Amino acid sequence: MSNSLCMIRLTSLVAAFIAVLALGGCGGGGGDIVGTGGTGVISGEVVKGPVANAAVTAFAVSGGQVGAQLGTAATDASGRFMMDIGSYAGALMLRASGGSYKDEATGQVMPMGAEIMTAMIPSVSAGTATTVQVTPVTAMAQAMAQRMGGGMTEANIAAANAAMGAYFGVNDILRVQPMNPLVAGSGATATQDARNYGLTLAAMSQYAKTAGMSASSALVTAMMKDASDGMMDGSAAGAEIQMGMGGMMGGSSMMPATAGSSGLAAALTTYMNSGANMSGLNSSDVAALIQRLTTSTGRI
């Protein structure tokens, strides 16, 4: 081998090594280098049925309040997203808006409209990768944490997430991936947490259908308000909650006091016995969740 060829190859290796150093090391995906002190990455799914083409924005949280925007991304057809958040460390909020989803009860593709969904992470470490689910349930927990004394502190976020998970029988609402009951046979391999999670969302869809709501996404906003004071009783700090109605009913009506408890239990039972449920599961597979909601006082 000639000296000139050796020099060319050596120069190429040095250039590659310098490029790796400039990126902060090896690893990561899509150009994102994940490691302590490097670039942090938030990824996950937006689920109300998977929400395609939604805009997801991450915000810093400080002193119990939402702060600076950290990053933004769009979901793909399966509701998945990924974004860089730089070297941020601390509590974090995700907000998802827009896009469309396949409604569990009707099977129709529906726009999210003006509704938003949120999720709160108690703490992320600088330069690490975090995966999270953004769902109506995480949105309910965020609304609850925001209203607690001190606002969205790390302690309040953790407490609200845990309480909402316990209410719906899900161990970790941020990280358990909800089962999609519109996928044939999906219940066979799903954990009980994933079953409870996915079918809770389906029950909300069924409740909205039975109530005559034109879009089940509108129920997300109502449920967030209902959960904000720590009680699922159709009101928020004593003020009744309106639910937008559609179809022949039109207008709006007040949310029943039992909507978030026995009302959801009845909707879940109806959904499990309907042709829309493709999971392969029946009511006995979520009997504990149905019983919990049926007998609940609404306290989260």
Image (cartoon, rainbow, N blue to C red):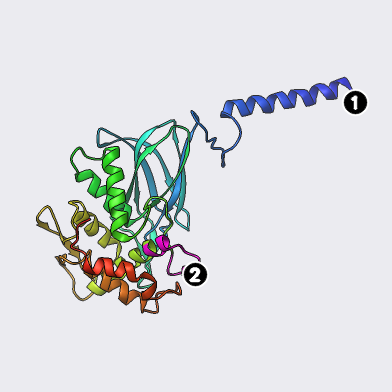
Q: Which mark is residue 188?
A: 2
Q: Which residue is mark 1?
A: 1
Tell me the element at label 2. Answer: helix
Residue 19 screen position, x and y as percent: 63, 27
Q: How many marks?
A: 2
Name which residue type carries label 2: Ala
Location of residue 256 by image quarter: bottom left
Nearer the observer, 139 or 247: 139
User: Left of 81 or right of it: where is 227?
Assistant: left
Is residue 214 visible in the rendered image? The answer is no
Would you say residue 168 sits in the magenta stretch? no
In primary-sequence order, the first of circles 1 and 2 is 1
Residue 246 screen position, x and y as percent: 23, 70
User: Left of 267 or right of it: where is 272?
Assistant: right
What is the magenta range? 180-196
Residue 59 screen position, x and y as percent: 34, 38
Name which residue type carries label 1: Met
Residue at the image point whose x is 73% and y is 27% from the top: 13
Nearer the observer, 155 or 52: 155
